[in-house]
Each structure stands twice: as C-alpha cells, then as structure tokens.
Amino acid sequence: MTLRDIAERLGLSRLTPELATEAAEITEGYVSDLLSDVLANGPKGGLLVTVQVHLNVIAVAVHAELAAVIFAADRVPDETVRARAVQEGVALYSANASAFELVGRLWELGVRAPE
Amino acid sequence: MRTVCRQIQGGGYEEGGAASRLVKEQLKRIGADPAVVRRAMIAAYEAEMNVVIHSHGGELRAWLEDDCLHVEVTDTGPGIPNIDQAMSPGYSTASAKARELGFGAGMGLPNIRKNTDEFAIESKVGEGTRLSFTIGLKPQALYGSGRNSIRIAAEKCRQSLRCVHACPTQAVRVFRGKPDILDYLCIDCSACIAVCPSGTLHVTGTAAELKPGADTVLVVPPAALVQFGPGVSAERVLREAAALGVGEVHVTAAWDAALQQAVLEYAASEASSRPVISPVCPAIVNLVETRFPSLISHLAPFVAGFEAAHRVLNGRGALVFVALCPCQRTALTGADSAAPEVILPAAFSAAIFPRLKSSAGARTCPETAAAGDESPLGDATDPRVMRSEVLRVGGLQHVINVLEAIENGLAGDLSVLELYACDQGCFGPPLLASDPHLALWRWEAAPPPPDPEARAVRRAAAFAPRRGLRLDEDMRKAIQKLARIDKLQRSLPGSDCGICGAPSCAALAEDTVLGRVAADACPRQRPTGEEDTK
C-alpha cells in the first residue's frame, strides 16, 4: 500500500505537497507520543501516528528514518515544523480521527507493527 | 581524531539534534554501514536531548579511532543523585514541559545502552554528568568503479587547468603537469573535453574512418546528420550514406522515441518512483549512481535508444555506430563481447563531405524537405505532444540542480525527466561542429522517416550505486586517513583556486593523504601547515 493510497482511504490532509514521496510503499507503522519510544521502535521507512506536533518530532523521524508522520485528532504543526519536514523529506499528514481509530484502520489496510 | 565538538544549550529544544547530525555526516563520509549509522544516531540524539532536557547546558564531543565511534556528552549539572534509578526503564525526572513535548518517558538512557557496544555514565550532584559510549563501525558494501572512454594525450597539455574546474564530480587532476582522471569518480561526460584548449583530453573511435562494405550496418544518431549546413537536409545525408555502399543505414531517432513511449508507460505504472528519470544519457545514469545513489530507484529500467539499436541489430552484419560522446562509446564497447565498430562524428562527416561536393545537383532546400511534414514519423518524437509529461534538461549544472531538487523532495510536480549531460541533449556534445541549437532546429524542420524496427529494450542488470568517494576499504584505515585529511585541509587556504591542479583544497588534502601528490603541492599553504600534516 502506497502513502498515496493510505492518505486517500483514510481521508488524510496532505501537509507537505512539496514532497514527491507519495509512491513510497508502506508496510509498517508505529503509534506513540513518547519520542524515545519512537526512536527505539519506529520502523525504518514506516509511518508514525502521534499527537505531538513540535519540531523534535521531525528530528526523531529523521533519526528513525520514518517515511511519514500522521498527526491524529486534528493536530496540525506550525509552519516552522512543516518547513523543516519538507527540508528533511519527511511527509506529514493530519487526520480528524483519533490515534486509536487511525491505527485500527491502518491495520485493516495491511500496515503492521515492526518486526 | 576529534571530529565533532558542539555546545548544547540546556532547554534548547529547537536546536535539539544539531550535534548528532554533525556526527552522522562524518560517519557517512567514511562510508559506515547505514544500519550502524542509525544506531549511532539514536544513541547520540538521546544523549544530546538529555542535556537539553535535564541540564544547565553541556557539550557533545565525538571522535573516530581505530574502527570505532566514541561519543562523550558532558553537562555542567545539576547531576544525577541515583544512577541505577536513572538507568531503569520508565524512571524519569523530566520537567512538565519536557513531558508535554513527548520526552521524559524514562527511556533515554536504556535506549542508549541498547544501541551501543560500550556505555558508561558517571555523575556528581552539583557538578554534572559525563556519559560516554562506543560503537564499532563496519563499512558499507563496496561496488566496482566506472569505466570511461576519455583518453589523455599528456604531451599536449598546456596546463590551462580548465578541466579541473569543469568536472562535475571533481574527477580531474593536473599534478606535475600531467592530467589524470580518477576512474571511480568519472561519469564519462564530456565536460573536460569541451573546455580543453589543447586537445589533451579527447575520445577516439575504435576505427579512424568509415570503411563501407556490403555487409556494413551503419547506425547514425540524428545530430550527425545535421552537421552540413543549411542546404543539406538529414534525408539527403542519409541518401548519401546509403550510396557509400553500406548494406543498411539506421537512425537512432525512432529508438529514442520508442524509449520515451516505454518510459511514459512505466511512469504511469504503480511500480515507479516519481519523477521517473529516463536513461537517455549514460553519463547522467553514471552521475546518479555516483553522486545521487538515493535516486537510483527513479531510473527507468531500460537501455538508451542507441543501446537498444545495438541489441536488436546485433548479428545482422558488420555493425558500425557513430558515437557522439565518450559515454556512448563506453556503452557500445562495454562488457558485451559483440562490440560494434565505433567511429566519431568527424569520421562520418569526412565520408559524406566529398559526396556533397561531387553531386552538387542533388541539393535539397530545407523548405522542400519541410513540406514533407506529414512524414509517418509518429507523434512520439514530437516534443510538443508530450510537453506536459516529459521535461528535458540539458547541461550538467542544470541537471545537478534538478537532481538535488528531487533528492530534497521538491520535484513532486514532475513526471518524466530526460536529463542530458550536454546542452540541447545529444545535439550538444563538443565532438560536433554545428551549434546544438542550429542542429536541433534543422533536424526538427525535416526529420527523415523513422526506423520501422525501432523498439525499447529493458535492462538486464539493475542500476547499482557506485563506489564513489571511499578513503579505504578498511574502516580503521579510513578513519586514520580522514583524520589526516581534516588536519591537512585546515592548513590549506580554503580558496579552492585550483593552481595546484586539484579542484578544491579538500580534494588536494585527500589526494595528499591518499598519496596521489606530494605533501607540498599547495603554492599558498601557510608555513604552519608543516606541523599540521604530521
């Protein structure tokens, strides 16, 4: 399942249209608001679902080599954070749904926990 | 060697991660395995954030020694009262602000321990904390270096040094008055040939002249057919070429068109990474494999038009190709055992010119030829039809800009790219006499009918990253060399003047350490440099 398909099926708003990463194939994901937890367990090339919207999320996403971050529960980062994500090549999306609902629907689409 | 030393502000959340990023750059430079780099970054970032979250401020120092990365992070207090407690997962003393930002889960120190080979922490309340860790490094898998067709006639060199600055991958050196090309960096474009005023850097054919025979199958690129001025159409040149007594003549234009069609279909498929880069120019494929390995998945898995012609026509007779540039020659005479004869455009022109004079009556005005516009050329070769789908970019500086934009994710609106090392694509190599714009205009005004046999050919072997910059295959030695390079570089003026024959001070420092040049090659080195280089 590509990022594009996931965004479409889940009705996500695309926050970083500058990035051409929509064709990336996503097989794994992780959900956490604790950044150390994301660093330790975030899947390389995978997705993160979180409600944290500050700059350090991008730094963590880069170090954990995540492909994309989905902000749950209508959270949207400010422009500084968004611009950094574009610079670093981390795709950002935002969703109305709660983290719990997002993860359930991602599982239905075949996205799994990292091995 | 110390490679990174950076201050960390207590409470400086916005700057968090800056020090670890510097460490990452050094690890990439020595070619460490990506998995090891990831572990090192997780540990360094956690340690850095600990200083931001818990302390009054501190410092991250990292150095490479033998085949290990050592990192030491110190702060100036307040210190940890009970280290055992701090090491147990889930225990944290982080502030409300830190917790709000998603830190302070009590996982930082356990995370560092998990990702490192050696780990130590000591702390004194009121004085500060010192954390250190070590990670053993191993090198990334290596790949072979490139081949090229650029030849050097060293005795002709007048040391203009233009080539040194013109090379897009810093592959050219002129030490001791003799030009040299570093094969592992050379992408086989013709940038150095184009600027060489003395003909020192050049390319040769496998044959000096065209010797037509009844079984000769001649394959000609469009650009070679429009080098004869305004009064001689491509179609006329083709007729004259056939009249030389060759068995068959093929033009590669339709093969390029077939490739474009195939790449457009590939780009529309799910499997492609967009934007898709069409492999029209072998030098650009080399550039991607050498300088932009992260974009390899964007290359469409086909061979260039002229290579497809070679594959399909192979075995038909005595194949003779007119190659426009070094990289075409390399692709044609490569590993393939059945390499064709390759001649250069000048040899083709030399064969055609006498015929143009002797049969002056056969002159064709371009106007007349243009009337045949409804020639069954097909829509695919008309660049206007695909304008919105295919972006053509010619000239290395522009190509590098575009590749950087893709790498930074700033080219999401592009679909298919045709990138050429030369201005105006294959009408622009320096081996051609005619101005590329004039030649392309004349070709488009009256192209001959397309080759009915043309089709696209898939690549058998996958694209792979090239070795590129690698100091030593032994990680331990690579680190030692990096240390010496850094030291030496600091003693050089940093102006990248190129007088020494290397393209930059950094390149000279590397060349010196790798033994390509004597230690005193820089005419402007500061006197203190002697000590630094020891």
Image (cartoon, coloured by chain):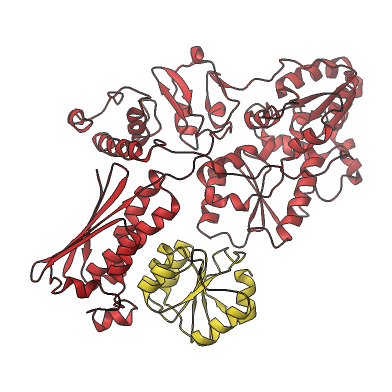
Chain colours: A yellow, B red
Q: Is B464 or B148 nearer to us in this picture?
A: B464
Q: From this viewpoint, is residue A24 visible?
A: yes
Q: Position of residue B440 (x, y in %)?
A: 73, 38
Furthest residue in direction left, as rendered: B126
- Give the image quarter of residue B31: top left
Q: Position of residue A86 (x, y in %)?
A: 47, 65
Q: Position of residue B422 (x, y in %)?
A: 62, 37
Residue placed at 78% from the left, 55% from the top?
A: B385
Quadrant in which the N terminus of chain B is drawn: top left
Q: From this viewpoint, is residue B230 visible?
A: no
Left or right position of B320 against B79: right
Q: Position of residue A107 (x, y in %)?
A: 59, 79
Left or right position of B348 against A19: right
Q: Is B117 or B359 nearer to us in this picture?
A: B117
Quadrant in which the C terminus of chain B is drawn: top left
- Give the image quarter of residue B442: top right
Q: Is B425 or B10 nearer to us in this picture?
A: B10
Above or below, comparing residue A34 to residue B513 in the picture: below
